[in-house]
Amino acid sequence: MSTPQAWRPGDGSARTETAKNSGFLGEFHEGHRWPWAIPPSMLQNRRMTSASSSATQKHFVALCEEVTAELNRLVPGIVDEIRRQVPEYHAVDRTEHEVSVTEQYRGLLAGLSERRPPNPEEVTRARSLGQRRAREGLTLAATMSAYHIGYREMWNVILARTATPEQSLSSELLPLVDLVWTWVQRASSAAAEAFEETTRIEDAARTTLLLRLLNGIYGGAPQHADLELTARALGFDPAKDFRVVVTPSESWESSRLNGFRRQLAKGARGAVAHSEVRGTSLVTISQGLPADELVEMLREQCADIAVGVGLQRAGLPGAADSATDAEESLVYGRGRSGDRVVWFEHDWLAITLFQREARLKPLLRPDRGASSLHGDAAVAICGLIDNGLSFSAAGRALHLHPNTVRYRVERWQQLTGWDVRTRQGLLRSVAALGLARHQPR
């Protein structure tokens, strides 16, 4: 494989060294050509372009002025093409998008007319746009793609104008290939650098705020005034409902975590969700994001990960309780077989009992041992409880004759000593079976 080389003015073969290091302009190695269209006539007439006549230059300047005057008509179609090829840009306000593209084109056309690269003001404008796109939650790849599509489309507009009988300027464009590429490189590199700087700064600030919020919630001071300000700074409404979801932090390498955070940023409209590692848990605190969607995002990144889902609760005190729900659900879920997503709202009794399992063991120990909690009799008891203590309904649910259900319920009483027709027997049966889901057979 040939070694990448720096792009040299005039050969159109590779990127500038700056572009190569930035990694944003594609891998144009030795032998690769300019990535946009160049008419064959321009290449055939290359020797004629070394000393362009002043008349031809005037014609080209007039062409640039003509295109500039028509930007209000041209830009909407180009913006349509950018948004078609880069769907992330649908999140960008349409009017602002058209204004920013128009500004880029005014600078480019002026620069081509004057045969100059971007000036400091135009580079600063590119940096500002990169910062804005970072704050809007777009990815760097999407932002760079939009730059390239936009410049390519304008290049095609210029080519189309020079190819008409009235404008025989095709050979005049060849020296401008290098200049246009310089514009692409400098503008996109400036935007990319500003994008990454903004992302680093905002990520650091977000991490500091989020850890401050989580420390307050976990530390038992959820009603502190400063914590409300912190929650608002992260986009939360302290008075609304919160939900906390946790997973083991050791399962999250940086690429997975970044992928999950990108998914969170694209969550349901109006939702707010942030995720950060705290101790041994990856803690996600959310507001307005459906919990099943959040769990699905987590499982997309780590298919078999244990997940503890706290109850949705009101206000910052509720967020603290939801965090406790989630952490306790995770501990319960990590040790049980089967589905490892544990919802506190579904398994609250078993989770709560599990926290006191050692103290409750004497009360919940079957007469004939723990194996009694996993046989056919246990299945029959669960079916009976889930079907209103009706033998007929339990039989239909379990595909058994009601008398078979009745026999197995009697067998349960013999094995455990608990009669489900009594309050104590029913409570002990429910509690023991709930804990048995967590225990290996």
Image: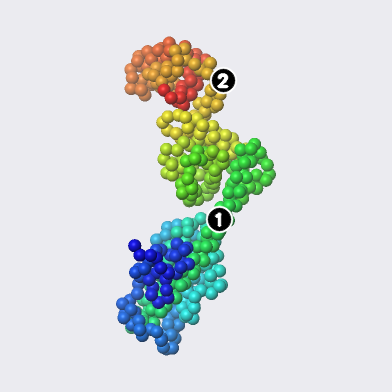
Q: Residue at (56%, 52%) from the top-left corner? A: 203
Q: Position of residue 244 (x, y in %)?
A: 54, 39
Residue 57 visible from this viewpoint? yes
Find residue 14 and report its image quarter: bottom left
At a point 64% along the width and 36% down the height, the residue shown is 220
- Left or right of 98: which side holds 222? right
Which numbered disc, 2 or 1, marks the residue that appears first in the sequence?
Answer: 1
Determine crowd level at label 2: few under 14, some 14-19, many 20+ residues with C-alpha closer than 10 A: few
Q: Nearer the viewer, residue 207 or 105?
A: 207
Image quarter in which the N terminus is found: bottom left
Image check: 370 left or right of 272? left
Q: Which image quadrant for residue 372?
A: top left
Residue occupying image coordinates x 59% and y 39%:
319
- Residue for badge 2: 359
Q: Amino acid at mark 1?
A: Arg
Q: Is residue 49 above or below residue 247?
A: below
Using the image, determine if residue 15 lies above or below residue 175: above
Looking at the rendered structure, the kind of residue marked 2 is Arg
Per the image, the residue denoted by label 1 is 200
Label 1 CA crowd tier, 10 Å (few <14, some 14–19, many 20+):
few
**Colouring mode (rainbow / by chain / secondary structure / one colour):** rainbow
Q: In this orientation, which residue lies closer to the viewer: 57 or 30? A: 30
Residue 268 appears left or right of 152: right
Task: State the residue at coordinates (35%, 72%).
Answer: 37
Dot 2 and dot 1 residues touching (CB under 8 Å): no
**Residue 409, x across and y down, in percent:** 41, 15
Residue 421 visible? The answer is: no
Give percent across and percent down for residue 212: 62, 45
